[in-house]
Image: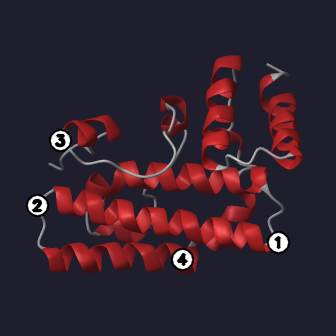
Amino acid sequence: MRKKPKTRAQLKSEGTELEGVIVAPWFKENCDGCSAKMFKRFHLITELTSGCYIHDAEYTFIPLAMPMKSKAAKAARKAADKTLLRNCKTIVGARGKHPIRRFWLSRAVYYAVRIFAAKGVTTVAKKYYRMPRTDDQFEEFAKMVHYAFPDSTEFVQGSLKKVYETYVAPS
């Protein structure tokens, strides 16, 4: 039987600090985390889940923060992928894995994401299941977006307003 993935709080209590946005519990419940077949095939999902949640959250916020075809969006995707790479190295290293395994595993995850994840990022923010449903969830969502993109622009404010009107207000 596989081990249960450690939460970010459990990793932190063991002295392992991850980079990136603090992901709200409701977002994790609605997120696929480490969904790539490679992760599941090699049972890496238990090791990397916390890092994958952070990465998924950051990818979800990119279309809300800037136009998707902009250079800034491309840079933000690359920054999110680099954060995933550093978090993978941190998580695998914290589990006492050999440095060579840590290097290759982290690189494999990074390049798989760089090559295959860009196709899904354009629609990921529009996916119904990742959006907040209540006022409390929307407040957490807005905090996560502002943490990921601290330069709060009119574009971000407009995007958050659309999210609220589309997903929270009707219910």
- Contact (CB < 8 A) between labels 1 and 3? no
Question: Does residue 124 show up?
Answer: no
Give the CA separation, mark 1 to mark 3: 40 Å
Mark 1 lies on residue: 69
Give the CA separation, mark 3 to mark 2: 12 Å
Mark 2 lies on residue: 96
- Disc nearer the start of the sequence (1/2): 1
Q: Secondary structure at mark 1?
A: loop
- Disc nearer the start of the sequence (4/2): 2
Residue type, numbered disc 2: Gly
Which residue is at a point 66% across and 71% down the rendered structure image? 75
Give the CA separation, mark 1 to mark 2: 40 Å
Near mark 2 (Cα within 10 A), the count class, few <14, some 14-19 or many ≥20, is: few
Where's residue 89, x and y in %?
A: 29, 66
Q: Nearer the viewer, residue 7 or 116?
A: 7
Residue type, numbered disc 3: Glu
Where's residue 134, x and y in %?
A: 69, 20
Where's residue 91, x and y in %?
A: 26, 57
Count of numbered labels shown in the rendering:
4
Mark 4 lies on residue: 114
Q: Secondary structure at mark 2?
A: loop
Give the CA separation, mark 4 to mark 2: 26 Å
Give the CA separation, mark 4 to mark 3: 29 Å
Give the CA separation, mark 4 to mark 1: 16 Å
Front of the two marks 4 and 3: 3
Mark 3 lies on residue: 14
Q: Nearer the viewer, residue 42 or 132?
A: 132
